Image: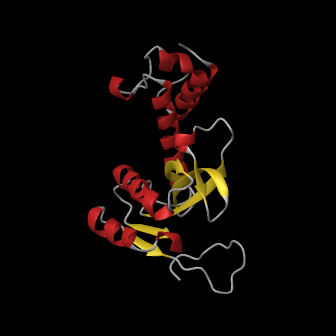
Amino acid sequence: METAFGRQAMGLLAALDTACDSTDDLEQGRCRGIPQARRPRHHHHAWHRVHDALWDRARVRAGLAPQPTAAVIDSQTVRGCDTVAAATAGYDAGKEIKGRKRHIATHTSGLLLAVVVTAASIQDRDAAHRLLAAVRARFATVSLVFADGGYAGRLVVWAKFVLALTVQIVKRRDTATGSEVLPAGE
């Protein structure tokens, strides 16, 4: 079934891949130099290829290696609407919000590495096990992860021995009020 969304994904993929001259070429299998196994069969896979190609280009243009070696993890609680299933929502008592929580891992430049969505009631350090496992599975080159004080404790030891990741807790300054960007390595 063809959709506008799918045509856009295929068009972007064709534009990114120098072996394809057009979306029609990609869909008809006329792309020069692309093995059949790498040609997307579903739009979902095409979006992953588009994302990965753009991600690699952004890193190389910034003067970085294509694969990351460090990550930053954090979470954000998002208020859920009435249609959110009760089984997937929770209450974040610290922020007094009922909804979901997205746990993200980014490269130190801000490029997204992994996302895990949980009920808002799940503690950051508990969801971080799944998040860090997802980072490790996709990016074997990541060896250092920066995190705030909410991730301190057993997670640091678990990440070191199970995933071979060093989690460095970046402490908030005592004089800080509100949000602040925490400097890595201090």
Instruction: Measuring from the top left, give residue 118's x and y in whole percent.
Output: 51, 49
| Coloring basis for residues | secondary structure
Instruction: Measuring from the top left, give residue 85's x and y in whole percent.
Output: 58, 37
For the view shown, which residue lies furthest in the right direction?
Answer: 177
Q: Nearer the viewer, residue 61 or 78?
A: 78
Judge left or right: residue 41 versus residue 55.
left
Residue at (54, 25) in percent of width and height: 10
Judge left or right: residue 179 versus residue 15.
right
Q: Is residue 18 above or below residue 167?
A: above
Instruction: Measuring from the top left, give residue 101's x and y in whole percent.
Output: 57, 52
Residue at (67, 60) in percent of width and height: 96
User: Can the viewer see residue 148?
Assistant: no
For the view shown, which residue lies furthest in the left direction?
Answer: 161
Judge left or right: residue 42 versus residue 137.
right
Q: Nearer the viewer, residue 50 or 14?
A: 50
Residue at (49, 41) in percent of width and height: 53
User: Can the viewer see residue 90?
Assistant: yes
- Residue 23, by quadrant, is top right
Instruction: Measuring from the top left, give residue 98's x and y in whole percent.
Output: 64, 51
